[in-house]
Amino acid sequence: QVQLVESGGGLVQAGGSLRLSCAALGSIFRLVTMGWYRQVPGKQRELVATITRDGSTDYADSVKGRFTISRDNGKSRVFLQMNSLKPEDTAVYYCAADRRGSNLFASWGQGTQVTVSS
């Protein structure tokens, strides 16, 4: 398993930007697909973006063109750059590691709150 710690959440006005960071502890980091999810209370967790070990990325339609996922294998970190934020992006964002299925990851972080005010 991989231990994950997210940071970078906060409060931002609509149209603003935030950069989330996820630090991973575990030697397999560079070998696994990483992802970012988000969850709003009362709703299912939503897969926002993924990045494979080779750097191939995929995004939810709701964030395409606004969010960018990246990784630094040397520092065992994955990032989510969020631009042009909207109030509907407000959620707890979770880092996930080691994809086992289309919507299944082996390890999860504790989450970081992102709040976008209108």
Image (tube, rainbow, N blue to C red):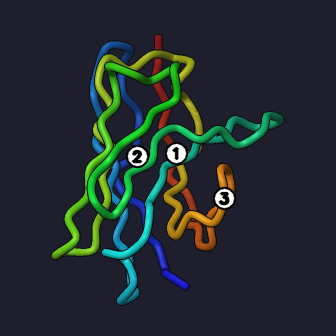
- Amino acid carrying mark 1 in the image: Gln
Q: Secondary structure at mark 2?
A: loop
- Between marks 3 and 1 in the image, the one whose residue lies nearer the viewer: 3
Of the two numbered discs 3 and 1 on the same chain, state the one appearing first in sequence. 3
Of the two numbered discs 2 and 1 on the same chain, state the one appearing first in sequence. 2
x, y percent for residue 53: 33, 64
Q: CA distance from mark 3 to mark 1?
A: 26 Å
x, y percent for residue 35: 48, 53
User: Which of these two is toward me, 66 or 57?
Assistant: 57
Q: Are marks 2 and 1 in contact (CB under 8 Å)?
A: yes
User: Which of these two is toward me, 112 or 104?
Assistant: 104
Q: Is residue 71 left or right of residue 106?
A: left
The numbered mark at residue 101 is: 3
The numbered mark at residue 113 is: 1
Q: CA distance from mark 2 to mark 3?
A: 27 Å
Residue at the spot 52% in from the left edge and 19% down from the top edge: 62
As displayed, is residue 70 above or below residue 97? above
Of the two numbered discs 2 and 3 on the same chain, state the one appearing first in sequence. 2
In the displayed image of the protein, which residue is found farthest to the top? Answer: 118
Q: Is residue 76 left or right of residue 85?
A: left
Residue at the spot 27% in from the left edge and 74% down from the top edge: 76
User: Which of these two is toward me, 32 or 25?
Assistant: 32
Q: Are marks 3 and 1 in contact (CB under 8 Å)?
A: no
x, y percent for residue 43: 79, 34
- Characterize the local packing of mark 3: few (<14), some (14-19) or many (20 or more) Cα atoms within 10 angstroms: few
Q: Is residue 57 left or right of residue 3?
A: left
- Characterize the local packing of mark 1: few (<14), some (14-19) or many (20 or more) Cα atoms within 10 angstroms: some
Residue at the spot 59% in from the left edge and 67% down from the top edge: 108
- Characterize the local packing of mark 2: few (<14), some (14-19) or many (20 or more) Cα atoms within 10 angstroms: some
- Amino acid carrying mark 2 in the image: Gly
Mark 2 sits on what residue?
Answer: 9
